Image: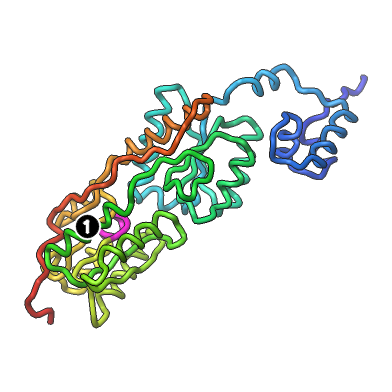
Amino acid sequence: MEEQVKRPTVADIARRAGVSKVAVSYALNGRPGVSDKTREKILAIAEEVGWRPNSAARALNNAQAGAVGLALCRPARFLGVEPFFMELISGIEGALAERSYALTLQVVGDHQQEIEVYRRWWGESRIDGAFLVDLHSHDPRVAAIEQLGMPAVVIGHPSAAGSLPAIWSDDGEAIRETVDYLLALGHRSLARIAGFPELVHTALRDEAFTAACGQRADHTIAHTDYSGDEGARATRRLLSSLQRPTAIIYDNDIMAVAGLSVAQELGLDVPRDLSIVAGDDSPIAQVTRPALTAVSRDIPAYGAHAAQTLLSSVAGEATRPLQDQAARLTPRGSTAAAYTGSTS
């Protein structure tokens, strides 16, 4: 029986060229992302082995994927307990569904892995565009996405978005409103328990908090990883100090709930001895006792606006930065006038 000749594949070319299958895909499809020298080498090997795309692959390459991507550089365990991303994704999904688009989601360990995921998805025509979240100053992902030429939308401040369109809200405005509110209640010792210090939105909030407090109140900032455990540890350190704050602003609801538990553990009454403000609003913040004063915004709408902008970019339409509605303070039972009696 005559042995069947195996048709050469992308994997065969990648092995002979000593490069990844994604690099081969870029070269064969005329996409940026590989050097001219590498592209020439890959094309020469493809010609030598007689590689030809089949009709199904050609049809796939000429069609849109009908999906966009989101790679999250966050521990997977956080996604189940942090309402912000779940609400953001629900808004994205709702807007995508209206256009029969799907969301491809993957959790990654670092930015380099995130870049590789986007390169692979784009090179394999699995997505038509992507979202970038949690931007850092001089974020390497922005330049990598720009080099790919892939449509993308930054969910964050445009100052770090490069040429990519950004969807953002004024993080500083909510902080200023919260500080003014606490000062009006007579608080003169404030703390902020924040997230990762390298994030652009954390830096903007830090700056707004420091400027709003100014000479009007003693103030301090503690940075964490957004988790309840880290929020609790930071709260315990602050409340165990000689000059403990009378009000604490948290970057999210999970840390605020953890902080409330620590205050009760130390025998402090909330809000008489300590006022607490959650940086995100959620059902969790509303069912605690006392219910948490929180910074509220329509997060699903925020996600929907990001998805609509990305789909416009995929369609080749002009896009520009969009400033969404700023968050607003919703006072509840966890804040009150500063107690002027004995704290012993």
Residue 105 picture location, percent across and down: 50, 39
Above or below for 325 versus 209: above
Q: Residue at point 59% right, 35% down? A: 150
Q: What is the chief secondary structure element of the magenta stretch?
A: helix
Q: Residue at point 16% right, 72% down? A: 268
Q: Residue at point 32% right, 64% down? A: 193
Q: Which residues are magenta?
A: 250-257
Residue 14: quarter of image: top right
Residue 90 picture location, percent across and down: 36, 36
**Horizontally, is 108 left or right of 335 in the view?**
right
Residue 228: quarter of image: bottom left
253 is within the stretch colored magenta: yes
Farthest residue in the right direction? 2
187 is within the stretch colored magenta: no
Q: Residues within 10 Å of mark 1 (few under 14, many from 20)?
A: many
Q: Amino acid at mark 1?
A: Thr
Looking at the rendered image, the quarter that the N terminus falls into is: top right
Of 143 and 120, nearer the camera is 143
Of 322 and 283, nearer the camera is 322
Q: Which residue is mark 1?
A: 178
Count all numbered tags in the image, as a single digit. Answer: 1
Residue 309 picture location, percent across and down: 44, 32
Q: Residue at point 33% right, 48% down? A: 170
Residue 230: quarter of image: bottom left
Query: Is the image coloured rainbow, by chain, by secondary structure, or in one colour?
Result: rainbow
Helix, strand or loop at label 1? It is: helix
